[in-house]
Image (cartoon, grey):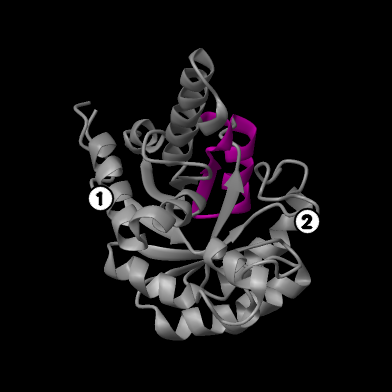
Amino acid sequence: MSFIHPHLRLGVNIDHVATIRNARGGSHPDPVRAAILAVEAGADGITAHLREDRRHITDDDITRLIAEIERPLNLEMAATDEMQTIALRHRPHACCLVPERREERTTEGGLDVVSGYSHLAPYVARLRDAGIRVSLFIAPDTAQVETAARLGVPVVEFHTGPYCHAAGPGRADELARLARASSLAHGLGIECHAGHGLDYESVVDVAALPELAELNIGHFLIGEAIFIGLAESIRGMRAAMARGRNRPA
């Protein structure tokens, strides 16, 4: 099988730089500075999740990211009127609609677009009509992919958390799910992204899936940056992605 996307893009999520800043207040460390450094180190884009409770990224961060970074901004957001208004005001390159619960530590699962079709449809349409590239963060599941296609989104992002947390045969099964869902989505004309929980080891097999065009990774990169620096952690991730993407078919 020939690779469909020779260059696998890396989107760096800078949320947890803001988490550290907000733990103490003030302005340091600055997530926008982290975004600029990430671009200099080879990031193809920046991802930021503006949560309803503003636990990490803030409205001012979004304003500055739009103004100061020289790569596309992928704004992760819940499908709410408040977030739609913010997205339409800033018009980032892309908006990824994600599930959100106040009590969760991080995004715990994919968006259920099957049961949420009627709720999601007007948000997808409004963002798309504004020229924003809409994606849906979903499980690698046939019904979710087919419903995403009915919603008319150009992109889906597959939740890789279950794959990353699995071990032994379970991980192989989860990888096979990702492969099947990516193939299905690609066949339906949808660009495939993936992310959540990926590290230097787990990313290799995911990067080998030829239909994937982009990986969005944050928590591991920011954590690793404590020990080796942000630029080096990103370069290490790019190298791991290259090992997977360049693997013989």
Which quadrant of the rendered structure holds the N terminus?
top left
Tell me the number on the disc at residue 125: none
- Which of 7 and 144 lies nearest the eye of the viewer? 7
For the residues bearing labels 2 and 1, Cβ distance under 8 angstroms? no
Mark sitting earlier along the chain (2/1) = 1
Whether 164 is drawn above or below 72: the answer is above
Q: Report crowding for label 2: few under 14, some 14 to 19, many 20 or more residues within 10 A (C-alpha).
A: few
Whether 119 is drawn above or below 46: the answer is above
Query: Mark 1: which secondary structure?
Result: loop
Whether 41 is drawn above or below 238: the answer is below
Q: Residue 50's spot in the image, x, y percent?
A: 64, 68
Q: Kindly identify the residue that appears in the image at 60 percent across and 84 percent down.
A: 60
The CA span between labels 2 and 1 is 35 Å
- Which of 44 and 224 lies nearest the eye of the viewer? 224
Q: Which residues are magenta?
A: 142-163
Which quadrant of the rendered structure holds the C terminus?
top left
Q: Is residue 247 magenta?
A: no
Query: Mark 2: which secondary structure?
Result: helix
Whether 4 is drawn above or below 24: the answer is above
Which residue has dot 2 on it?
Answer: 119
- Which of 205 and 14 lies nearest the eye of the viewer? 14
Q: Is residue 55 visible?
A: yes
What is the three-letter code of the residue carrying label 1?
His
Q: Residue 4's spot in the image, x, y percent?
A: 28, 41
Kindly give the residue lying farthest to the top in the view shown. Answer: 169
Q: Is residue 143 magenta?
A: yes
Q: Kindly identify the residue that appears in the image at 39 percent across and 35 percent down.
A: 206
Q: Residue 150's spot in the image, x, y percent?
A: 62, 47
Q: Is residue 8 visible?
A: no
What is the three-letter code of the residue carrying label 2?
His
- Which of 88 and 14 lies nearest the eye of the viewer? 14
Which residue has dot 1 on it?
Answer: 7
